[in-house]
Amino acid sequence: MLTVAVVGCGRIGSLLEDDPLRPKPASHLGAIAACAERVRLLAVCDTDRQRLLLCQKRWHVPHVYLDYREMLGIERPDLLVIATWTESHRDIAVFAARNGVRGIVLEKPMAIDLEQAREIIATCRTRQVKLVINHERRWDPLYRKAAEIVRDGRLGALRTIGASVLCQSAARGSWKSILDEVGGGPLLHDGTHLIDMIRYLGGEIHTVQGSVRREVPEVGVETTAVGQLECGDRVVVFLEAGGMREYFHFELDLQFERGRLKVGNGVRELWTVAPSTRYSGFADLVPGEFPPLAGGLNPFTGALREAADAIDQDLPETAILSSGIDGLRAMEAVFALYYSAFIGGKPVAMPPRLSGHPLKKMFQTGML
């Protein structure tokens, strides 16, 4: 049985487990409790003492720490889950990889810039540490079924994708509004999931172009990002992130030669082709029955079990469903869009060749 420790007792680490509307488990510590046959929890760490003690009581944690370095030096876990703010990801992951862990489950986005993301990957490779990025939809039965539909060809070739992750602007003063702490706005913080699903369902991204806006001057990140991407076999993607909405919504609308597939938060639709009832000699899209989803899968336990399997079976990076490279590719597309915005919306080939952080340059030059 593998031993595990967690850094970060906030929402994704623990607190979401108490949301009555979310399917369980809904947090990393919830997943650990659900996988007691595979892993044993040693300790948790958080810089907030009160939150740490609440977490200890909630999950019956044997040992708690305020410093992850001390925790790793004493406990020596096989697997570390990093569920902290983005700015700390690189330091914790690199230290852990250099100090004895065998696997890491790392929250998204994996770092605040591409240089840090590459350093995490390089260190894990050198130390032979298995790295899993928590783009959790890869283990969600809905998106796995969508991928099956794309790949079995029942709807013909995929032609376009409409992709949106819509949300409110970050609140002034929150960590999500501070560029040095989060690395970007909704395109990076929430859009990393969207772009990861574009790659997962549509194939590798080849070119990116787009623009960003900041509708709230007091917020230090973009509030809206829009873009056009090309992925897979000439699949065109239309993307929006943020968008100043008074709700949160995540959706992918996949248009095929002979059908349409929509998946997202509360969305599960399949449309097929039938003779038109309105125009002679034409065909229409008509609602079809979405195939049943596989049971027994959960996004959080999926990531944890993926990391455990990678350690136990010594899986290569290419066999990990959501590897460090997958996390990096999503970030590259985000930063390519930021760079395209910086250079006036021109197309940017992947992977982007960047010098510095393009969003920071837009702020420094008064473009945002």
Image (spheres, rainbow, N blue to C red):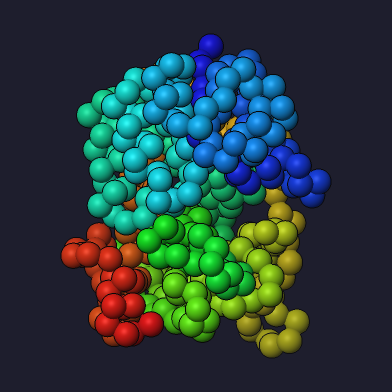
Q: Which is nearer the eye, 159 or 196?
A: 196
Q: Position of residue 18 (x, y in %)?
A: 76, 42
Compared across the picture, whether 124 is left or right of 238 comes to: left
Q: Where is residue 31 in the image (x, y as percent from the top left)?
A: 63, 31
Q: Which is nearer the eye, 180 or 161?
A: 180
Q: Residue at x 29, y 55 (%)?
A: 114
Q: Which is nearer the eye, 303 or 4?
A: 4
Q: Where is residue 236 in the image (x, y as percent from the top left)?
A: 42, 72
Q: Residue furthest right?
A: 20
Q: Residue at x 37, y 78 (%)?
A: 210
- Location of residue 291 with respect to 67 vertically, above or below: below
Quadrant position of residue 62: top right
Query: Is residue 109 visible to the viewer in this orientation of the structure?
Result: yes
Which quadrant does the C terminus fall into?
bottom left
Q: Position of residue 280 (x, y in %)?
A: 68, 87
Compared across the picture, whether 59 is left or right of 325 comes to: right
Compared across the picture, whether 266 is left or right of 238 comes to: right
- Location of residue 42 with respect to 359 vertically, above or below: above
Query: Is residue 299 visible to the viewer in this orientation of the structure?
Result: no
Q: Which residue is drawn at 25% across and 60% down?
A: 351
Q: Which residue is drawn at 59% across and 78% down?
A: 244
